[in-house]
Amino acid sequence: MKHILLLSLFSITLLSAHAQRRRGDDTAHYRSEPIPAHLMPIERAIGGGVSSVYFYGGKKLSSPYSLEVPFYELNDRTVTHHFQTFRTMTTLSRIIGLIPLGYVLLNRNTTNGAYWTVYGGSVVASLTLGIVGNSQVNKAVGRYNEMMRQPRVGLSAAPVPLTGQYALGAGISWGF
């Protein structure tokens, strides 16, 4: 039992330290440029269970991990922080889900009922971390959509068919 607790604490500490170090390293990569014109808002529908269903550009995304590209292209510290917290919580949830397996493999005496305590505790901890992670990705989506409502200015050039000329355009968008 002591080995499992020590292994769990070590894993959580290691992942937390890695997440903190990553967050510190990423701060140098932010730019203060306007929002890229190709980014689209993210729609969220409440799905079954604990998680949400996300749509980007009218297409249903297979998982919240699919939001990584638009989040990083937006290049907002708050959005990136929430998404990295989501990833950390999801990883911890999956690791904690393996604790009962480790208990069975490391403990020879499984007849005392302690297994069910370990199993129940890991289920509760895993679900809690999953809920916290999903709330973080929902916060990231909210902030992302808030940033998308900022005014955006764009220029475009497109060929006009059959004339060989180009049409130029300029525009400003407020909202989506």
Image (tube, helix red, strand yellow):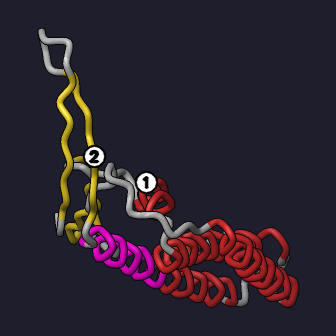
At which x and y percent is residue 49?
30, 72
Q: Quadrant of residue 39?
A: bottom left
Residue 150 visible in this rendered orientation of the protein: yes
Whether residue 132 is in magenta: the answer is yes
Cα separation, mark 1 vs mark 2, equals 28 Å
Task: Give the residue at mark 1.
Answer: 66
Residue 103 visible in this rendered orientation of the protein: no
Q: Quadrant of residue 54?
A: bottom left
At 50% from the left edge and 78% from the top edge, which residue is drawn? 82
Quarter of the image where the C terminus is located: bottom left
At 61% from the left edge and 74% from the top edge, which residue is drawn? 88
Task: Give the residue at mark 2.
Answer: 155
Q: Residues within 10 Å of mark 1 (few under 14, many from 20)?
A: some
Nearer to me, 137 or 163:
163
Quarter of the image where the N terminus is located: bottom right
- Residue 21 appears left or right of 160: right
Tag 1: residue type?
Answer: Ser
Whether residue 118 is in magenta: the answer is no
View extreme (left): residue: 162
Magenta segment boundaries in residue numbering: 131-149
At which x and y percent is residue 16?
72, 82
Mark 1 vs mark 2: give the one in front: 2
At 34% from the left edge and 75% from the top edge, which residue is drawn? 50
Q: Residues within 10 Å of mark 2 (few under 14, many from 20)?
A: few
